[in-house]
């Protein structure tokens, strides 16, 4: 059993273990879950070193469905993001969750299993199974079943080889419809404007840890799926639709920021800001440039860290004042200076201050967009102005000014447990902002392959059909 | 290896120490850390510059790759050339003086450690800004100083007007940064790199239209940071911050970043004629526009704030007229005398326990003589009286403007007269005549007056530092002859401004009000700063906010999109209602449906199967 399998299945084992614990001892359950999630995170760090790992063996042989999992620069950091955030999610739930504790923590580990699984699956059926943890997109199931009727496999690598060698050919109409079915499933998850209205409501309903996992990792399933599957498998269709998708992404960037600005509820404000941030990811992806793709993938991680931290901090505020309305706060700086400082740093990361993480991603996305079409960058850069408006306005209203008695009587500074939850996120903000080269080379390695796959396919569309198989085969072998 | 990185990192350490532990440290320790880090940084600058000698070409140190994507590599590289050397000396030199002054000024304020932590952080970013060897590192400093400006303007965070001003500064600067960012994107597309060393030598071979666009976008960035029209509106409000902040950030250093950036990009502007012309127009327009507002302000800091906007306009005029070294020269002398004006104003405010309104001052000349005499040095310097600092640099700009277009010279002379008038007005109202307040003024302690004295000396003699000559390897001097008549006219204009102010506020004190009344609407317009803030509020801020709330959030999001989604849901419900009719509970009718469905599925498979493989 290799490390990848261990990291993948350990949360599932943890899920079962926690279920077996006595339900009457919540303290024990919390400690066990925290220890397990920390151990899994420690183990997962090993994935960043050493040789790339993969497991490929038959799962349901009669249908030729394989258990095929693999890590590359695209999935590695997203898996680490999941394992990194799970212990933090445990910590922020510590006091907040006091009913059905066992089920809650068990399902947190099951969620970790599902998320890690989504990011490593190289078999579409397996991917679908892991995706099931969140929602059931029927058209996506139909699309992969349709592909299966044609290729008799769900395996991504095999599919790519068949596409490259010409053994599996999709006519333009087929490619378009398959692309749209895949893309639609992913775009809801991202969420791309105008499919975003579920997100603010979901965040308001969710507990803090739920919001953290939802914003930080689960949304990335959508953008990950687009980069991993939509682009390389249906490159011609992806390029044909790029203008429309980019338009929606840019509308999302500006629209999300504008609507965020007028939210009276903190969680909704952060949720709408996610619509704006994720618009950058989609924009970078469909710029079909190296900088754009690198920026998009990096921005997935950045958004996971900084928006995760924002939800953690909003959770801290909620635990004190029991309100998410900005107007119920004010002057928090005076009674809770460290909480305010940490919130400010996170705010600055979120609005893309250089030396903090988001800046590098946003810059690369804009650079890629500018290379594809300068006007895209012009519109998208408006989002950078607006992000300062909504975040700083919220910060001013919640943290500055005189402290009303209703706030003062509830407010105290960060506790040790809260520091433990937020400090790793702060460290990552600075690290990813200053030492981006820790992460980017691995990302570039994978995105350059994906980019080549989309470029080559388009080029051969234009050239004589006879050359098609050979040129693409070379690319497949190059992998 | 000169270890350039120490120059910014020393203040950064000061920030970290005071920021993390300052609350628990004794005041003396906080002071030692804050001052020590900046003074050491200044010492390191001097040591480095001595070590580097003549500095005919840029000296570069490369540390690590910040990020790389494809062919684009952005490195953490610092470089020093003569322009950077000038900036380094101004930033750390004047910065050190202002730090020392602030020890006295802030000693009775809450959040002492927080203030110095922010101030040190500012020094770090400002030094990164001038040392960065590529546009993106310059941008790091650029954004960082903006952040510190935001934090320090809103230092008194219990006051809403202060935090409003901080937020306004940040957001208006972001509009400028929008231009700067786009310029960088275009530079990468055009040059394939952001390194100064790769971009500037290649500028001559690039199409002028592209360079013009880059130049205009960079100018938009500079207009934000250096408070030029139409983005100057944040700087007067920034006076909400403590006075040492106004001196350091909003007069001597940060606001000159735009001037530095344009001068740094001179290679681009020299090949982008229209963009450079635009620099001159913006500069001249801002200079005269802000000067008129300065004529009628009653808050001593506001007078100097509009003066800063106006003087920065002067620097841009110099840059736009092709006299890059004159612009930088004025940046240097302005750093001396404007820092002094603000610190002196701070000393006045300190003496009067917070009073900032000129109408409540008066007669302070004998009460706080040190402050008066040092301020008088700044006064003659900014009024352009020879041989003091402002005279030399303003003269260089005006001559270049005349060489470029004579009408610009005349507008510049008019501005010089107004400048002399409003500064004299402030001086006369504060220091001459009878005391109009109920204060018991006391002179500031030596820790504050000593920096005033040093700056006074620099304001008097700073003009003899031949900055243009020093910068000649970077910016060739224009051959325009030293026209004595042109110089004399501008000096006379300055004297006339002083004389008119003396007439209005010393000789015939009632005259000013009479003139104001006679001007009527025009005076109201100027007094209210041309209602520009109100205009922006009505034309931009409110429509965006209301539109976002009513049209986008409540209209599109809640109405249109959710409405459509609910519409789909209700269609589904209605369909479900219809389909329920089918569920008759009759087994035989179920069986019929099963058969019917199976046939459909078979047909579908047949259709799809035809297309497979």
Image: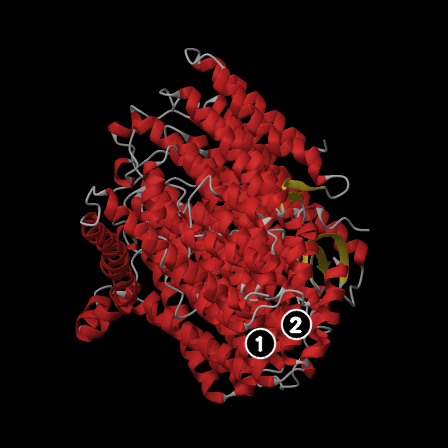
In this orientation, which residue lies closer to the viewer: A320 or A301?
A301
Q: Residue visible at 41% across and 20% down?
A: A101
Q: As drawn, is B43 to the left or to the right of B322?
A: right
Q: Earlier in the sequence, mark 1 or mark 2?
A: 1
Image mark 1: chain: B
Q: Which residue matches tag 1?
A: B396
Q: Which residue is the site of mark 2?
A: B468
Spot occupied by residue B392 in the image (x, y as percentages of width and height): 57, 71
- Residue B166: where, in percent of width, then height? 39, 50
Say which residue appears at 38% left-offset and 54% top-offset.
B598
Mark 1 is surrounded, within 10 Å at the Cα level, by few (under 14), some (14 to 19) or many (20 or more) other residues, namely many
What's the residue at 49%, 22% (across, down)? Answer: A417
| Between A259 and B579, the one nearer to me in the picture | B579
The answer to whether residue B365 is visible is no
Label tally: 2
Q: Are marks 1 and 2 in contact (CB under 8 Å)?
A: yes
Kindly identify the residue that appears in the image at 57 percent across and 65 percent down. Answer: A234
């Amino acid at each position: 059993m290799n490390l990848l399998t261990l990291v993948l299945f350990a949360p599932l084992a943890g899920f079962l273990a926690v279920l077996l614990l006595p339900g009457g001892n919540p303290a024990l359950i919390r400690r066990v879950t925290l220890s397990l999630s920390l151990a899994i995170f420690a183990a997962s760090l090993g994935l960043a070193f050493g040789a790339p790992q993969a497991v490929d063996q038959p799962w349901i042989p009669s249908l030729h469905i394989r258990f095929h999992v693999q890590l590359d620069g695209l999935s590695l950091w997203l898996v680490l993001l999941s394992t990194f955030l799970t212990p933090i999610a445990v910590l922020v739930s510590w006091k907040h969750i006091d009913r059905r504790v066992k089920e809650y923590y068990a399902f947190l580990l099951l969620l970790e299993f599902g998320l890690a699984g989504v990011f490593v699956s190289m078999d579409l059926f397996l991917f679908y199974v892991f995706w099931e943890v969140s929602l059931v997109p029927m058209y996506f199931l139909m699309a992969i079943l349709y592909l299966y009727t044609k290729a008799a496999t769900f395996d991504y690598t095999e599919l790519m080889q068949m596409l490259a060698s010409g053994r599996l050919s999709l006519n333009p109409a087929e490619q378009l419809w398959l692309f749209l079915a895949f893309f639609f499933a992913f775009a809801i998850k991202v969420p791309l404007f105008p499919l975003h209205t579920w997100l603010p409501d979901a965040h308001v309903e969710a507990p803090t840890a739920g919001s953290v996992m939802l914003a930080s990792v689960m949304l990335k399933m959508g953008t990950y799926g687009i980069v991993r599957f939509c682009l390389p498998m249906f490159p011609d269709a992806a390029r044909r639709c790029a203008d429309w998708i980019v338009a929606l992404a840019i509308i999302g960037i500006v629209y999300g920021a504008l609507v965020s600005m007028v939210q009276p509820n903190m969680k909704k404000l952060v949720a709408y800001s996610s619509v704006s941030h994720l618009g950058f990811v989609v924009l970078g992806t469909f710029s079909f440039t190296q900088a754009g793709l690198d920026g998009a993938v990096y921005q997935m991680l950045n958004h996971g860290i900084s928006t995760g931290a924002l939800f953690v901090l909003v959770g801290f505020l909620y635990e004190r004042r029991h309100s998410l309305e900005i107007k119920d706060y004010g002057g928090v700086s005076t009674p809770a200076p460290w909480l305010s400082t940490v919130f400010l740093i996170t705010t600055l990361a979120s609005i893309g201050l250089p030396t903090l993480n988001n800046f590098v991603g946003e810059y690369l996305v804009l650079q890629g967009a500018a290379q594809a079409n300068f006007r895209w960058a012009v519109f998208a850069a408006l989002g950078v102005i607006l992000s300062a408006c909504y975040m700083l306005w919220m910060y001013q209203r919640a943290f500055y000014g005189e402290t009303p008695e209703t706030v003062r009587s509830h407010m105290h500074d960060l506790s040790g447990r809260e520091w433990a939850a937020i400090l790793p996120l702060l460290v990552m903000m600075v690290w990813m902002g200053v030492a981006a080269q820790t992460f980017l080379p691995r990302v570039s390695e994978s995105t350059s392959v994906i980019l080549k796959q989309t470029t080559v396919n388009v080029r051969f569309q234009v050239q004589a059909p006879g050359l098609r198989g050979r040129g693409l085969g070379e690319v497949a072998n190059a992998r | 290896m000169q270890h350039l990185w120490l120059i910014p990192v020393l203040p950064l350490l000061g920030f970290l120490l005071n920021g993390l532990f300052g609350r628990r440290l004794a005041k003396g320790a906080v002071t030692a850390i804050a001052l020590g880090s900046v003074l050491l940084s200044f010492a390191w600058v001097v040591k480095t510059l001595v070590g580097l000698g003549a500095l005919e070409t840029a000296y570069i140190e490369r540390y690590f790759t910040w990020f790389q994507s494809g062919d684009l590599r952005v490195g953490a590289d610092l470089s020093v050339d003569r322009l950077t050397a000038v900036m380094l000396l101004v930033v750390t030199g004047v910065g050190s003086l202002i730090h020392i002054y602030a020890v006295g000024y802030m000693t009775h304020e809450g959040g002492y450690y927080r203030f110095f932590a922010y101030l040190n952080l500012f020094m770090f970013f400002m030094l990164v800004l001038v040392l960065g060897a590529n546009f993106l590192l310059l941008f790091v400093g650029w954004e960082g100083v903006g952040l510190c400006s935001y934090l320090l303007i809103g230092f008194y965070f219990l006051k809403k007007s202060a935090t409003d001003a901080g937020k306004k500064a940040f957001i208006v600067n972001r509009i400028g940064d929008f231009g700067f960012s786009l310029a960088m994107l275009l530079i990468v597309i055009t040059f394939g790199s952001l390194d100064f060393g790769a971009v500037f030598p290649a500028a001559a071979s690039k199409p002028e239209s592209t360079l013009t666009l880059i130049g205009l976008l960079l100018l938009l960035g500079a207009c934000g940071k250096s408070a030029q029209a139409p983005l100057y509106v944040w700087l007067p409000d920034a006076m909400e911050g403590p006075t040492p902040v106004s001196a350091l950030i909003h007069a001597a250093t940060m606001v000159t970043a735009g001037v530095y950036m344009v001068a740094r990009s001179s290679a681009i502007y020299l090949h982008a004629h229209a963009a450079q012309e635009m620099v001159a127009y913006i500069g001249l327009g801002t200079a005269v526009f802000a000067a008129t507002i300065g004529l009628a302000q009653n808050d001593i800091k506001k007078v100097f704030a509009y003066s800063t906007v106006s003087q920065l306009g002067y620097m841009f005029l110099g840059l736009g007229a092709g006299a890059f070294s004159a612009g930088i020269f004025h940046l240097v002398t302005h750093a001396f005398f404007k820092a002094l004006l603000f610190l002196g104003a701070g000393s006045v405010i300190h003496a009067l326990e917070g009073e900032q309104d000129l109408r409540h001052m008066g007669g302070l000349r004998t009460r706080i003589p040190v402050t008066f005499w040092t301020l008088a040095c700044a006064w003659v310097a900014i009024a352009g009286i020879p041989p003091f600092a402002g005279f030399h640099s303003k003269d260089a700009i005006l001559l270049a403007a005349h060489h470029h277009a004579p009408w610009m010279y005349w507008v510049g002379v008019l501005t010089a007269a107004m400048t002399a008038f409003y500064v004299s007005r402030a001086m006369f109202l504060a220091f001459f005549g009878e005391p109009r307040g109920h204060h018991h003024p006391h002179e500031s302690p030596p820790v504050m007056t000593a920096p005033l004295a040093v700056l006074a000396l620099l304001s008097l003699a700073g003009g003899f530092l031949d900055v243009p000559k020093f910068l000649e390897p970077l910016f060739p001097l224009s051959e325009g002859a030293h026209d004595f008549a042109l110089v004399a006219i501008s000096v006379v204009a300055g004297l006339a401004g002083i004389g008119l102010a003396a007439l209005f506020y010393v000789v015939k004190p009632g005259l000013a009000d009479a003139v104001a009344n006679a001007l009527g609407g025009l005076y109201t317009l100027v007094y209210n700063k041309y209602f520009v803030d109100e205009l922006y509020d009505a034309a931009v801020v409110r429509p965006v906010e209301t539109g976002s709330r009513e049209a986008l959030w409540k209209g599109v999001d809640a109405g249109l999109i959710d409405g459509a989604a609910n519409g789909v849901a209700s269609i589904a419900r209605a369909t479900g209602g219809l389909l329920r009719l089918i569920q008759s509970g009759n087994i035989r009718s179920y069986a019929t449906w099963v058969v019917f469905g199976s046939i459909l599925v078979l047909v579908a498979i047949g259709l799809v199967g035809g297309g497979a493989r």
